[in-house]
């Protein structure tokens, strides 16, 4: 494991810290390392939830490393199987990723927050896209942001680099919790533990079905689900856990999930 990507396993919770002073910017090597980390997380049956945060108090991540770009690293470099930042495009990642934003989330750092399943942010955190001032665009941001806010706002934020506070993004439903910095990781872990108390196959089915039916009408979504388009959903319905849940309720005890 590189010094830039620090990993701690806290029971079924994987905590990943991006640590590249001064701004936690991500170059090709760092992104490939993050991709390896999140691929192992996806494939490890013991791990349930990941939390990604940044080291320090000023930056969560400044996104794409412009210093590396100035030295010749291409904008379309191979960032690993999971795409830029390790998890944004990782195939079959049916486990939740929580992003804990400890400071500024700039460009690709903002994209990581948009790609997360849940976001907890420190009160002083700021978010903005500045790629247009570097002669490029935020690819994932341009694709994802219009699904979160009206297109007029998305255009303004993408085209002007407007700085946004955590409270502003919370207003638009893009952040689950805004907390003081000293409470950031505690809140992220609390959220992760809440997820870990649920049936893992059910959590995976929710993530897969939400992802795969995005853009469908309600009727199309039900058809897709009932015709077997979601393997995780089918696996959940026929699982031992689907029997354990009602049994535990009837016996007035906590369920013991097996993930099978």
Image (cartoon, helix red, strand yellow):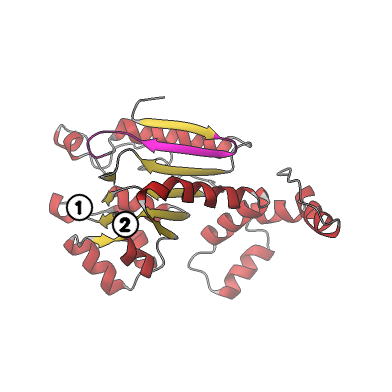
Please report the residue visible at 68 percent of the width from the left and 63 percent of the height from the top: 227
Give the percent coordinates (x, y) of residue 100: 40, 48
Please report the residue visible at 42 percent of the width from the left and 49 percent of the height from the top: 183
Please report the residue visible at 31 percent of the width from the left and 57 percent of the height from the top: 141
Q: Quadrant of the N terminus?
A: top left
Residue 131's disc number: 1
Horizontal side of residue 85 vs 255, given as left or right: left
Q: In whole angstroms, how far apart are the C-alphas of marks 2 and 1?
A: 10 Å
Q: Is residue 21 magenta?
A: yes
Label 1 Cα neighbours within 10 Å, binned few <14 / some 14-19 / many ≥20: many
Residue 213's disc number: none
Question: Which of the marked residues, 2 or 1, is nearer the chain's N terminus?
Answer: 1
Q: Is residue 170 above or below residue 114?
A: below
Give the percent coordinates (x, y) of residue 20: 28, 33
Of the pair 178 and 164, the residue shown nearer to us: 178
Q: Quadrant of residue 250?
A: bottom right
* CB under 8 Å between discs 2 and 1: yes
Give the percent coordinates (x, y) of residue 186: 47, 47
Where disc 1 sits, the SS reads: helix
Please report the residue visible at 19 percent of the width from the left and 60 percent of the height from the top: 161
Highlighted magenta segment, given as a residue range: 10-23
Residue 88 visible in the picture: no
Q: Which residue is mark 2?
A: 141
């Amino acid at each position: 494991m590189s010094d830039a990507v620090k990993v701690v396993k806290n029971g079924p919770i994987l905590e990943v810290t991006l640590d590249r002073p001064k701004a936690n910017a991500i170059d090709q090597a760092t992104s490939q390392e993050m991709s390896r980390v999140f691929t192992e997380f996806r494939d490890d049956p013991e791990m349930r939830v990941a939390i990604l945060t940044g080291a320090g108090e000023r930056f969560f991540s400044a996104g794409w490393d412009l210093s590396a770009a100035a030295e010749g690293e291409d904008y379309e470099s191979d960032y690993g199987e999971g795409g830029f930042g390790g998890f944004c495009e990782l195939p079959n990642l049916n486990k939740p990723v929580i992003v804990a934003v400890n400071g500024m989330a700039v460009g690709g750092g903002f994209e990581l927050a948009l790609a997360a399943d849940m976001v907890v942010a420190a009160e002083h955190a700021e978010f903005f896209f500045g790629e247009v001032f570097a002669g490029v665009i935020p690819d994932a941001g341009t694709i994802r942001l219009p699904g979160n806010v009206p297109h007029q706002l998305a255009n303004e934020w993408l085209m002007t680099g407007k700085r946004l506070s955590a409270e502003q993004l919370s207003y638009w439903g893009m952040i689950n919790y805004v907390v003081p910095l000293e409470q950031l990781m505690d809140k992220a872990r609390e959220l992760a533990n809440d997820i870990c108390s649920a049936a893992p196959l059910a959590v995976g089915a929710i993530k897969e079905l939400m992802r795969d039916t995005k853009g469908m009408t309600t009727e199309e979504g039900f058809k897709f689900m009932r015709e077997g388009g979601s393997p995780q959903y089918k696996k959940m319905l026929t699982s031992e856990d689907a029997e354990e849940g009602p049994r535990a309720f009837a016996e007035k005890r906590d369920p013991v999930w097996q993930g099978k």
